[in-house]
Image: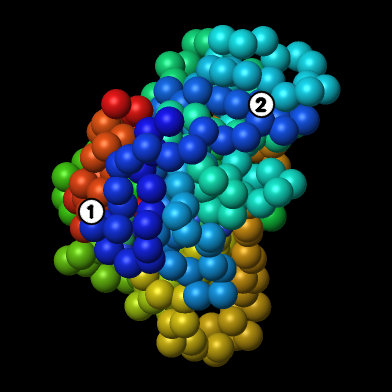
């Protein structure tokens, strides 16, 4: 098969689109012919190399996979060759595209219990935007965050994959959303996606703006998977008993801390990692039924994965980037 292979950790020049051995189909597996694979920020972290989380090189990233069944392993029932499917990447063997070989390829092998029948109201491209983004956002907001109807929610990095899904799920639950993004254009698109308020944090102090929007009471919830310099201003924007929900640290995992906000306001800092298959299925249904909107999708041929990752690294995109096998 052809695959976009990470040959060594480092820059995008280490991604080579080339022949790679087909995955070996073992008992209990489904072999998926990839039709679309959504790009996520963790694909960039995998390629750069995550300290303490080594992958065995050469490696193929990509966990958000939609495609058709190409083969079924011994003992697998309920799937026929040609069925349209979506992959839940959080498998028992590890995360697809982070710990086991991923979907930036023509074929990928997945344990059958993590293969979901695709709701055919969704195209492969749209389906490939769902698993990590809606799965993670669902777990952060609902399973772990206990989001309440009428909560005022501040979302950083709202213009990307997890961010746009967070905005959608929060609005669908009846929360009011203040969405932060790095340009006026991204803010305008977030308004079209349903954000109640937007803040361009490249030129405005988002913490002060959110404080003002909340009527100087503070926001109920802040979603911050950015970290870095945004961490302390996020704590400062929260009300007494407010919650900070995090699932990552795109801009830095060891920010300056200010513990005063945490004790004085009795804040809750709640982490989320991964999601359950039900979170993915709920996201898929919500998008298929039109209750949850997807952001703009930009597609690239898989052979141009390096170019697509460069755009994501430069924050020069809105919403989702999806790779399609050449
Ligand atoms: N733990 C989990 O289970 C889990 C699952 C999924 C994702 N994550 C994490 O969640 C984070 C977001 O993932 P994603 O796939 O949604 O990423 P993404 O699509 O690239 O979106 C991230 C957004 O953050 C903003 N941003 C702020 N500072 C940035 C910086 N220094 N570098 C890059 N972007 C920056 C950018 O928007 P602006 O330019 O508008 O500011 C960008 O659109 C990542 O850290 C990822 O690893 C964790």
| Camera-side residue of 252 and 43 | 43
Residue 325 horizontal/vertical position (percent): 35, 28
Q: How many marks?
A: 2
Mark 2 vs mark 1: in front: 2
In the rendered view, does 18 fall on the left or right side of 42?
A: left
Circle 2 crowding by C-alpha within 10 Å: few under 14, some 14–19, many from 20: many
Q: Residue at x 67, y 10 (%)?
A: 80
Q: Looking at this rendering, what residue extends furthest in the right direction?
A: 75
Image position of 326 (left or right of 145): left
Q: Which mark is residue 95?
A: none
Residue under label 2, please give it.
30
The alpha-carbon separation of the residues under discs 2 and 1 comes to 32 Å
Q: Where is the N terminus found, in terms of image quarters? A: top left
Identify which residue is drawn at 63% across, 59% down: 272
Residue at (56, 25) in percent of width and height: 32
Secondary element type, mark 2: strand
Q: Earlier in the sequence, mark 2 or mark 1?
A: 2
From the top left corner, tell me how far across and down residue 324 is, in percent.
34, 28
Give the image's coloring scheme. rainbow
Quarter-of-image position of residue 205: bottom left
> Looking at the picture, how far across and down is residue 280, in whole percent?
62, 34
Q: Secondary structure at mark 1?
A: helix
Seen at 43% across and 40% down, the residue is 20
Specify the quarter for ligand 1. Answer: bottom left
Residue 293 can be seen in this image: no
Residue 303 appears in the picture as rendered: yes
Front residue of 54 and 218: 54
Q: Quadrant of the C terminus?
A: top left
Residue where numbered disc 1 is placed:
310
x, y (%) of residue 296?
29, 32
């Amino acid at each position: 098969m052809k695959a976009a292979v990470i040959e060594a950790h480092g820059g995008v020049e280490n991604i080579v689109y080339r022949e790679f051995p087909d995955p070996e189909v073992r008992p209990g597996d489904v072999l998926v012919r990839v039709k679309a694979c959504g790009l996520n920020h963790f694909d960039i972290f995998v390629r750069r190399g995550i300290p303490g989380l080594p992958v065995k090189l050469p490696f193929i990233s990509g966990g958000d996979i939609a495609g058709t069944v190409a083969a079924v392993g011994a003992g697998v029932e309920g799937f026929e060759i040609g069925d349209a499917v979506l992959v839940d990447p959080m498998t028992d063997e590890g995360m697809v595209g982070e710990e086991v070989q991923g979907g930036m390829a023509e074929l990928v092998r997945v344990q059958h219990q993590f293969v979901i029948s695709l709701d055919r109201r969704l195209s492969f491209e749209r389906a490939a935007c769902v698993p990590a983004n809606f799965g993670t956002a669902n777990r952060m907001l609902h399973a772990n965050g206990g989001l309440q109807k009428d909560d005022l929610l501040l979302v950083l990095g709202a213009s990307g994959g997890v961010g746009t899904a967070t905005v959608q799920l929060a609005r669908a639950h009846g929360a009011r959303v203040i969405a932060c993004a790095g340009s006026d254009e991204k803010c305008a698109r977030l308004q079209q996606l349903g954000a109640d308020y937007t803040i361009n944090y490249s030129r405005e102090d988002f913490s002060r703006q959110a404080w003002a929007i909340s009527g100087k009471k503070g926001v109920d919830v802040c979603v911050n998977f950015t970290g870095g310099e945004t961490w302390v201003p996020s704590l400062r924007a929260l009300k007494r008993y407010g919650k900070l929900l995090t699932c990552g640290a795109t801009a830095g995992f060891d920010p300056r801390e200010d513990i005063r906000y945490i004790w004085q306001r009795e804040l809750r800092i709640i982490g989320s990692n991964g999601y359950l298959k039900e979170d993915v299925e709920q996201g898929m249904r919500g998008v298929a039924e039109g209750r949850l909107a997807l952001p703009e999708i930009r597609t690239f041929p898989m052979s141009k994965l390096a170019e697509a990752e460069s755009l994501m690294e430069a924050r020069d995109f809105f919403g989702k980037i999806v790779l399609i096998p050449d």
